Amino acid sequence: MIHSRMACRLLTYFGALTASTTRIQVSAFSPFVKTTLGGRGVAARSTSTITLKSLASSGDITSSPASSSTVDNLSTLTLLEHINLNVPNHEYILEFYSNVLGFGLDPRRAQNVVNGSGTVWMNCGASQFHLPVGDAQVIPGSIGLWYESLDGLKARLENYDDQEAKPFVQHSVENDGEVNEAVRIMDHYGNVFFCRKGGDSKNENEITRTVKQPILYKTKEDIETYSSAAELYGLDSVDDESECKGVSYVEFLVPRGTTEKIAEFYDCVFDATTSCFTDPSSNDDVAIVAFGSIANGRSSQNMLFRESDTELPPYDGHHVALYVGESKEDFEQAFKNILEAQVLWVNPRFSDKVTNLNTAKKWNQFRFKHITDLKTGKKIFELEHECRSVEHDSWPGK
């Protein structure tokens, strides 16, 4: 069971980014205070009432200042496990994710590298990027990655300075002199990555530190099985880990006036830990949805939704995959809440055609793509979510 989350309910933007490039005072933030969901009524699209229930592992919650708590709490969203981005081919991605960002190649899709076509999985800690071949997809925002040190990344980027052909478009080092620096990199398709130094968590037992996705190595066995893929992209020793330690956040730009409703959606449907505040550096309203462990205003991972005047492009089908709760009961309650919110969705591209609880149990996952105003049913933002149970075959914590 997840421990009762009775300490810090204040998620800070600084904590969400691990190390923000902007100096932000915690006192500027307002907590999004959460209450137990049992019995809460939310107006549905019809005249009936949706009653969204808390997940089995949720506890009663109170609010207290971040600075007063050293207790570790857990969000009911366990892990932001993968980000799916279509790419036109393998031309740039293998060198970019492996040789630049410091990811490891997943052996479960390494044969596609040998064949020169098909989906590639690139791994960093407990998380992955799924890179199927198709029209390029772009996150309308940015992706945060964390490292124990940025020295290796910066040295590799400098090696490309005199080269015309690069596996990325541009890079820069951003530092306001107050906090840890960030390396900003844009890939060939427009996806922006912010790489920051992390590693200062006092909780060495959190999933993002203890769980690792499988990685290809330059061992005799891997070379015999995967030939050139292992020789080119395998790590040197089985004792090595990917230099990139994981995904710290994904930030999406959203229309003005939507962040509180987005936070309410995750709060109600997933019983998740959320926070809303105004970023004092830009006056943009931001919603934070926390994943994993939470302590002193920091969570293991986050999804961020930042209000912007930017004209957003049409949704192109990129998606995120997340694990819900700690048990099948948590997963099943989340599925029931998705049904109540009337946002369950089947992606015809994939084989998991989940339309009811029985098929959700069969596949140990379900999908939705509309974040809605739960009072009116109006669509706020479009983003496919692949929601999995910890009993899913691909759960990296097994």
Image: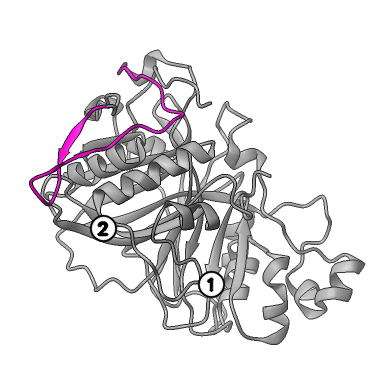
Sequence-first disc among 1 and 2: 1
User: What residue sits 73% from the left and 70% below the top?
Assistant: 233
State the residue position of label 1: 131
- Amino acid type at circle 1 is Leu
Report the residue that reaches farthest toward the top.
68
- The percent position of residue 379, horizontal first and vertical second, equals 18, 58
Residue at 54% in and 79% down: 166
Residue receiving disc 2: 253
Which residue: 62% across, 85% down?
117
Give the overall secondary structure of the magenta segment. Answer: loop
Along the line of sight, the residue nearer the viewer: 333 or 83: 333
| Helix, strand or loop status at disc 2 | strand
Q: Quadrant of the C terminus?
A: top right
Task: Provide the residue span drawn in magenta.
Answer: 39-65
* Residue 195 in view in this figure: no
Q: Nearer the viewer, residue 351 or 2?
A: 351
Residue nearest the observer in this picture, 55 or 153: 55
Q: Is residue 294 left or right of residue 147?
A: left
